[in-house]
Amino acid sequence: MATITLRMPDDLKAKAQQLASEQGVSLNSYINATLAATIAQSETLAMMGDRLAGVDEDKLHDRVMKFMSKSRGGKEPTPKEIDAARRAK
């Protein structure tokens, strides 16, 4: 594992420390998780860009709208309902 020295403005560090504290993790863990999520997002966007290159946007839009027209809205489950469903397995 690499070790680096990171310089950042004091106010940014304070905000990051606050968010880390709210999540119950160290500043180091928070920065690592945030950086990993940013990289994953960038890689996903690049992969989707590659997959969608040359795709007819109108046809894609029509397919998405057709799918959405068949989907029914519903009530989102509560965290308690999700936990109960997981325990029921």
Image (tube, rainbow, N blue to C red):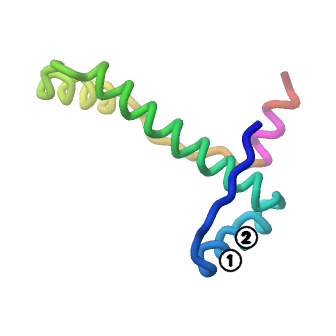
Cβ–Cβ below 8 Å for labels 1 and 2? yes
Please say whether residue 84 is one of the residues in the magenta stretch. Answer: yes
Residue 66, position in %: x, y?
25, 25
Residue at 83%, 37% (x, y): give it. 84
Residue 24, position in %: x, y?
83, 61
Return the residue nearer the eye: 60 or 70.
Answer: 60
Mark 2 secondary-structure assignment = helix
Indicate the quadrant containing the C terminus: top left, top right, bottom left or bottom right. top right
Q: Is residue 48 left or right of residue 40?
A: left
Indicate the quadrant containing the N terminus: top left, top right, bottom left or bottom right. top right
Circle 2 residue: 17
Give the magenta part as a residue range: 80-85
Identify the residue at the far right of this view.
87
Circle 1 residue: 14
Residue at 64%, 61% (x, y): give it. 6
Please say whether residue 89 is one of the residues in the magenta stretch. Answer: no
Residue 58, position in %: x, y?
11, 27
Identify the amino acid type marked 1: Ala
Identify the amino acid type marked 2: Gln
